[in-house]
Image (cartoon, helix red, strand yellow):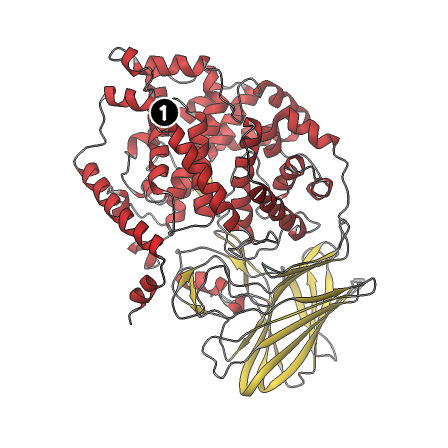
């Protein structure tokens, strides 16, 4: 039986019916696109943009009507409402005086053509070529969106993320904020040029920028924020204004018909449905507005629950996407609450649990571990936090859910919170008394994580133990399934005294270089064990796995004297008979950690244990079987091996290839860092132990 046939047999009747309907709908859309069926007359545009007014408008009056209407319209309930902006700007000046210059500097650089996308600094002079990849130079064709050929990416020639990131236009936000803060029309006029240029060069349904509903959603939201921040200052001519209104309509219509059911029912579908709902709320004049609102909210309620396990952890097993998805759902809750509209208790509770998960993952430096895939994107871009810092979401969550502990971990009211929640939200945040979370250890049994911490202060220890499934919905058979989770079963990260010591290998890019992409997703890029060179799952192109191992339950005990956790998994891909792995971690609540590994099975196998370090200097321990570590942040520690007398200890650093001693710190970012590989040929069953302890730095 072919792989394709097996996948088809695994689909539900509902999915099969949807895919058939989607195929025929796309075919009809393609025919209409090629025949010019979307080149609507002014009369038809009027019936779509403002059907209640269309019969009253004379030819040529549509642009003037829309401009006057939006300048004088009594706002439907919406974030960044014009009557709220003066107070928000005033408060911004008081809370973030140091950010005013920073925002204007970024806006000024962008206006001069200097951008930073996914780890690359790019200069793009006007007119911007929206179809040329700024990194690889690849020129994308003008073609119907469903016919875009991604072979260039699949063959390792480049990555569509770069061209998409340019067209998301999140740099508009800095310009819009700079305009609000300074009144300098240079920034608002640059927004007009960028938006108009994009619309002109990317006709409806034509090309790479219409090939992904997520990209359409991200661009729509950035446009919406920019439009809100600037539209009452008469920065658009009537004709330019109408061009933008038409583009808003086309983006909403596209989302309405291309929500990523079954194709990407994860963070993609949440972002798309939230933005569809926002567009329907913001433009009640549109003929489809009510349908957009209904469709968007229905998807949010149904699929919002599916993004997180009952304990709040992400079903994608990727912390960046956990928080990306959470950010969009918070936007939806903020707007619904402002409207006085209902939100199901089940969804509200799941979002609160997801915020708790982020809170527990947040370490004393404000960041979360780099677990799973990432692409640097955020649901909203009003501030520029460090890549893995999501405390802005906790600040918003503390207000929505009245959570003193979330305020404590958030520490402050962020720029994002101010723009989205306004003066009322700031007053609510200030009225909350921060409260230290009561517990210091917690199991997340559904998502498969255990968190140990010595406290919630600024120089605390923090361990993340990963015993969760590689991703929800993966097949345990040979049928491949996409996932943002990595082959990281029983891996862990460890921060000591508020400084990272043992880190996740992270992530780099999707398609730019298949060799690098695969390295960062495989088990050898995580702090776990390989047997016979085998990983926990079978790698199957890009971000797909098959034949995944099954994790066991987490068993943990915490007391005043120590903390202990253990779990296991069912085996390694293609190793038969199966060899299972059980790992236990013990913490003496001082500065000493023990990592104990047991391998079942029979026969002799090459066993490898990996420890990925934060950037550090390392050397062999004198008279001991281990490594002395001093990180660049000044943390000194020792890693020692017990009960494995004939093991080899190798420090990997300075190599050129993916296995040469690297960590991925964000999409398009990688950094040199030592990897400790401890290996040997081991008869099974067997067990061994690793000791990790913080030590005092020697006096120079």
Residue nearest the observer in this picture, 280 or 129: 280
Residue at which label 1 appears: 286
Badge 1: residue crowd in 10 Å (few <14, some 14–19, many ≥20): many
- Residue 149 showing in the rendered view: no
Q: Residue at the location (74% across, 63% down)?
A: 636
Please say if 693 is above or below 102. below
Residue nearest the observer in this picture, 337 or 546: 337
Image position, residue 618 (x, y; %):
66, 67
- Residue 176 showing in the rendered view: yes
Image position, residue 99 (x, y; %):
62, 31
Q: Residue at the location (38% across, 63% down)?
A: 541
Q: Is residue 244 left or right of residue 423?
A: left
Q: Residue at the location (34% across, 20% down)?
A: 50
Image position, residue 670 (x, y; %):
52, 56
Q: In which quarter of the image is the C terminus?
A: bottom right
Count the numbered circles shown: 1
Q: Residue at the location (46% across, 50% down)?
A: 266
Q: Is residue 303 left or right of residue 457?
A: left
Location of residue 629 by image quarter: bottom right
SS at badge 1 = loop
Location of residue 196 by image quarter: top left
Image position, residue 568 (x, y; %):
60, 72
Please say if 577 is above or below 565. below
Please say if 288 is above or below 64. below
Q: Quadrant of the N terminus?
A: bottom left
């Amino acid at each position: 039986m072919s792989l394709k046939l097996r996948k088809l047999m695994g689909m539900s009747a509902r999915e099969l019916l949807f895919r058939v309907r989607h195929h025929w709908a796309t075919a009809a859309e393609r025919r209409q696109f090629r025949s010019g069926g979307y080149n609507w007359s002014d009369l038809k545009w009027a019936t779509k943009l403002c059907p209640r007014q269309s019969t009253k408008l004379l030819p040529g009056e549509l642009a003037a009507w829309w401009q006057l209407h939006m300048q004088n319209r009594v706002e439907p309930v919406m974030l960044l409402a014009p009557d709220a902006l003066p107070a928000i700007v005033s408060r911004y000046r008081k809370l973030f005086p140091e950010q005013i210059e920073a925002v204007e500097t970024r806006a000024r650089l962008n206006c001069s053509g200097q951008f930073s996308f996914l780890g690359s600094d790019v200069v793009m002079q006007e007119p911007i070529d929206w179809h040329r990849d700024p990194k690889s130079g690849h020129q994308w064709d003008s073609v119907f969106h469903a016919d875009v050929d991604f072979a260039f990416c699949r063959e390792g020639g480049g990555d569509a993320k770069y061209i998409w990131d340019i067209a998301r236009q999140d740099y508009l936000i800095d310009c819009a904020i700079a305009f609000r803060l300074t009144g300098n029309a240079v920034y608002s006029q640059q927004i007009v040029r960028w938006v108009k240029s994009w619309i002109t060069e990317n006709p409806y349904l034509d090309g790479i920028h219409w090939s992904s509903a997520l990209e359409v959603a991200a661009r729509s939201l950035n446009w919406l924020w920019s439009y809100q921040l600037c539209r009452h200052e008469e920065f658009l001519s009537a004709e330019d204004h109408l061009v933008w209104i038409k583009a808003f309509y086309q983006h909403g219509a596209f989302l309405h018909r291309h929500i990523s059911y079954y194709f990407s029912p994860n963070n993609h579908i949440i972002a798309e449905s939230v933005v569809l709902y926002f567009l329907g709320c913001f433009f009640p004049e549109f003929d489809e507005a009510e349908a957009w609102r209904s469709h968007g909210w229905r998807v949010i309620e149904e699929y919002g629950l599916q993004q997180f396990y009952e304990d709040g952890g992400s079903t994608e097993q990727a912390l960046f996407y956990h928080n990306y998805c959470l950010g969009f759902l918070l936007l939806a809750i903020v707007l619904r609450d402002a409207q006085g509209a209902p939100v199901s208790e089940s969804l509200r509770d799941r979002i609160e649990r997801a915020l708790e998960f982020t809170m527990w993952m947040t370490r004393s430096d404000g960041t979360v571990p780099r677990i799973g895939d990432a692409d640097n994107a955020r649901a909203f871009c009003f501030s520029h936090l460090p890549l893995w810092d999501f405390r802005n979401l906790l600040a918003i969550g503390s207000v929505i859910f009245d959570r003193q502990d979330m305020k404590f971990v958030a520490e402050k009211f962020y720029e994002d919170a101010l723009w989205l929640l306004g003066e009322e939200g700031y007053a609510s945040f200030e009225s909350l008394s921060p409260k230290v979370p009561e517990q210091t250890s917690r199991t997340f049994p559904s998502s498969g994580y255990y968190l140990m911490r010595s406290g919630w202060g600024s120089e605390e220890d923090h361990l993340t133990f990963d015993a969760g499934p590689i991703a929800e919905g993966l097949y345990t058979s040979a049928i491949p399934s996409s996932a943002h989770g990595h082959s990281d079963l029983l891996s862990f990260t460890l921060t000591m005294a508020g400084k990272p010591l043992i880190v996740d290998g992270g992530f780099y890019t999707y398609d730019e270089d298949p060799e690098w992409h695969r390295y960062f997703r495989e088990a050898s890029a995580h702090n776990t064990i390989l047997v016979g060179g085998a990983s926990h799952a079978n790698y199957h192109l890009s971000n797909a796995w098959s034949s995944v191992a099954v994790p066991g339950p987490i068993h943990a005990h915490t007391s005043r004297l120590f903390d202990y956790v253990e779990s296991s998994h069912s085996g390694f891909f293609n190793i038969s008979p199966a060899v299972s792995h059980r790992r236990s971690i013990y913490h003496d609540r001082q500065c000493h950690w023990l990592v104990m590994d047991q391998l079942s099975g029979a026969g002799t196998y090459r066993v490898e244990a990996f420890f990925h370090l934060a950037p550090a200097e390392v050397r062999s321990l004198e008279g001991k079987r281990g490594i002395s570590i001093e990180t660049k942040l000044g943390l000194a520690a020792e890693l020692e091996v017990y009960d494995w007398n004939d093991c080899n200890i190798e420090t990997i650093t300075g190599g050129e290839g993916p296995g040469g001693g690297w960590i991925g710190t964000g999409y398009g970012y990688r950094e040199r860092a030592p990897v400790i590989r401890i290996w040997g040929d081991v008869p099974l069953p067997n067990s061994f132990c690793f000791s990790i302890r913080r030590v005092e730095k020697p006096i120079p």
